[in-house]
Amino acid sequence: KVAVSIHATDDFNTDIINELKGLDYIHVDVSDGEFTSFKNPNLEVFRILHERYDLPIIAHMMVVNPSEFIEQIIEFVDIFTFHKEIEGDIDAIIRKVKNKNKKVGLAINPNTDISEILSYLGSIDLVLVMSVNPGGSGQKFIPNSVEKVNRLREYKKKYNFLIDIDGGINLKNAPELNVDIISSTSTILNAKDPNRVIESLKDSS
């Protein structure tokens, strides 16, 4: 399946999604300026997307304190994904999201090993493998992400979670990725024929 990945910025024109056909998810990045080098939280984007489009929304919280955002956006999202690398109580955040009857995902940066999230696989619904360092779109794919995905697939035999990958995905490397969801920004939005790209990515995932 394919998600178009967008940033929750003041200047994002949500109308662009009207032109995209065949999407399975909308992936929305939120940055607080601390976890990543830039800050973009226009949380109103979630409400607008929820009201306009009949697509599940994945919130990707690139923030130091995900808990403070839950109440503000949870009614508009389907999967609330936050990073393993935060210093807060991960189990408590998982419980808080689950108590809202929403799905929860855990994201891992390129330098975080799969072994660091094994204890959470039984209680989460999605693992987001970052195949670039968190930040702007257009970065190059980090090759060891393929190995991470392959290791995660072994654990899917025991646990019920989706594998999502985000960063540097294009039509050349997508066929290598045995994932459930491909999240893409520039490959889709900068394409001459975005819908053809979406179709090709779906064939790969």
Image (cartoon, rainbow, N blue to C red):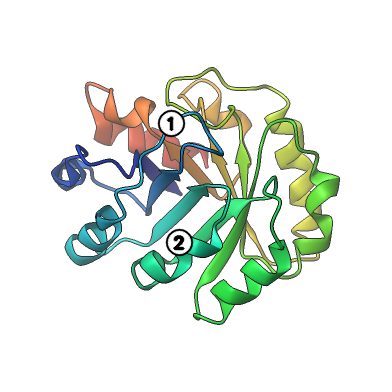
Q: Position of residue 110 (x, y in %)?
A: 69, 31
> In the picture provided, is 23 more to the left or to the right than 51?
right
From this view, report whether residue 172 is shown above or below residue 86. above
Residue 53 visible in the shown view: no
Specify the label residue 38 is tagged with. 1
Q: Secondary structure at mark 2?
A: helix
Identify residue for label 2.
Answer: 69
From this view, report whether residue 70 is shown above or below residue 145. below
> In the picture provided, is 109 more to the left or to the right than 1?
right
Q: Nearer the viewer, residue 61 or 170?
A: 61
Q: Secondary structure at mark 1?
A: loop
Name which of mark 1 and mark 2 comes first in the sequence: 1
Q: Nearer the viewer, residue 90 or 23?
A: 90
Q: Position of residue 67 (x, y in %)?
A: 54, 64
Numbered label tally: 2
Specify the label residue 121 is tagged with. none
> In the picture provided, is 11 more to the left or to the right than 131?
left
Q: Amino acid at mark 1?
A: Phe
What is the spatial separation of the Cα atoms under label 1 and label 2, in whole angstroms? 17 Å
Q: Nearer the viewer, residue 149 or 122?
A: 122
The residue at 82%/48% (across/down) is: 116
Q: Position of residue 200 (x, y in %)?
A: 40, 33
Q: Position of residue 202 (x, y in %)?
A: 43, 42
The residue at 24%/46% (across/down) is: 21
Task: Report the residue that reaches farthest toward the top.
Answer: 140
